[in-house]
């Protein structure tokens, strides 16, 4: 089972391309893929994702988030055990300089296959750039939370996070197709 997640709109936006990508995957009705839109909330996203992982026991978790300032896809290499946000989540909660797991490791490396994903992105006319970490907001929070959960409960499973730039209609279609090719990759690697 492959689990794909995105987020609902946040910070006053009315749309989030990762929500639309998840809805696209849901519409494909793939029997070995589950896709969820997470709330942009530390507590609710963690609870929803923890529940989904424990119920589905996926072999791969591919999390997507919006990076409004990006122009390319960004492959986040590290999930850091730190919430470091300057703005509150959709529930109004601000987490600044706060560990995610008090006794957890400092960080987890993402485990999705970067090079094959990058090659597929290039074939689709997109760029997948490596990025050090997923920031300090809810994206990093869920990346770390899932990585920690898998390390402790499903050590053979893998997780990773990709930030998506804002998308227009044509680019959205291309990235939705690219995501489908990544799913095929995850099935075989």
Image: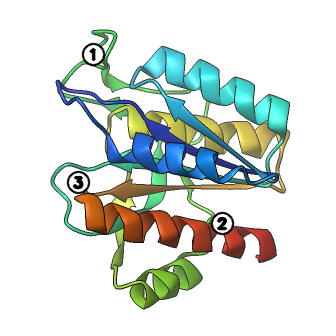
Between the C-alphas of marks 1 and 2, the distance is: 34 Å
Please give the name of the residue rendered at 20% of the width and 26% of the height, measured from the top-left corner.
11
Q: Which residue is mark 3?
A: 166
Seen in the picture, residue 50 relative to 120 is either above or below; the reply is above
Please give the name of the residue rendered at 34% of the width and 85% of the height, measured from the top-left corner.
125
Between the C-alphas of marks 1 and 3, the distance is: 24 Å
113 relative to 119 in the view: left or right: right
Seen in the picture, residue 62 relative to 98 is either above or below; the reply is below
Between the C-alphas of marks 2 and 3, the distance is: 21 Å
Q: Which residue is mark 1?
A: 94
Q: Which residue is mark 2?
A: 183
Seen in the picture, residue 119 relative to 149 is either above or below; the reply is below
Residue 136 placement: quadrant: top left
| 2 and 3 marks in contact (CB < 8 Å) | no
Q: Earlier in the sequence, mark 1 or mark 2?
A: 1
Q: Earlier in the sequence, mark 1 or mark 3?
A: 1
Q: Earlier in the sequence, mark 2 or mark 3?
A: 3
Please give the name of the residue rendered at 83% of the width and 30% of the height, measured from the top-left corner.
55
Q: How is the image coloured?
A: rainbow
Instruction: Answer yes or no: is residue 82 visible.
Output: no
Q: Secondary structure at mark 1?
A: loop
Residue 151 placement: quadrant: top right
> Is 6 or 102 nearer to us in this picture?
6
Q: Secondary structure at mark 3?
A: loop
Q: Which mark is residue 168?
A: none
Tag count in the figure?
3
57 relative to 119 in the view: left or right: right
Quadrant of the snapshot with the C terminus: bottom right
> Is 180 or 139 nearer to us in this picture?
180
Please give the name of the residue rendered at 50% of the width and 70% of the height, measured from the top-left corner.
177
């Amino acid at each position: 089972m492959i689990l794909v997640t995105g987020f609902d709109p946040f910070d006053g936006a009315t749309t989030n391309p990762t929500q639309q990508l998840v809805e696209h995957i849901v519409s494909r009705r793939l029997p070995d893929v589950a896709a969820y839109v997470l709330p942009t909330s530390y507590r609710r996203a963690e609870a929803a994702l923890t529940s989904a992982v424990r119920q589905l026991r996926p072999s791969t978790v591919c999390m997507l988030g919006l990076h409004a300032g990006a122009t390319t896809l960004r492959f986040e290499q590290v999930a850091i055990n730190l919430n470091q946000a300057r703005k509150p989540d959709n529930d109004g909660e601000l987490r600044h300089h706060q560990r995610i797991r008090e006794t957890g490791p400092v960080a987890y490396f993402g485990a999705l296959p970067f090079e094959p994903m990058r090659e597929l992105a290039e074939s689709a006319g997109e760029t997948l750039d490596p990025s050090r970490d997923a920031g300090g907001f809810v994206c990093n929070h869920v990346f770390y939370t899932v990585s920690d959960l898998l390390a402790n409960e499903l050590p053979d499973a893998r997780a990773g996070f990709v930030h998506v730039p804002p998308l227009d209609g044509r680019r959205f279609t291309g990235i939705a197709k690219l995501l489908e090719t990544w799913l095929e990759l995850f099935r075989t690697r």
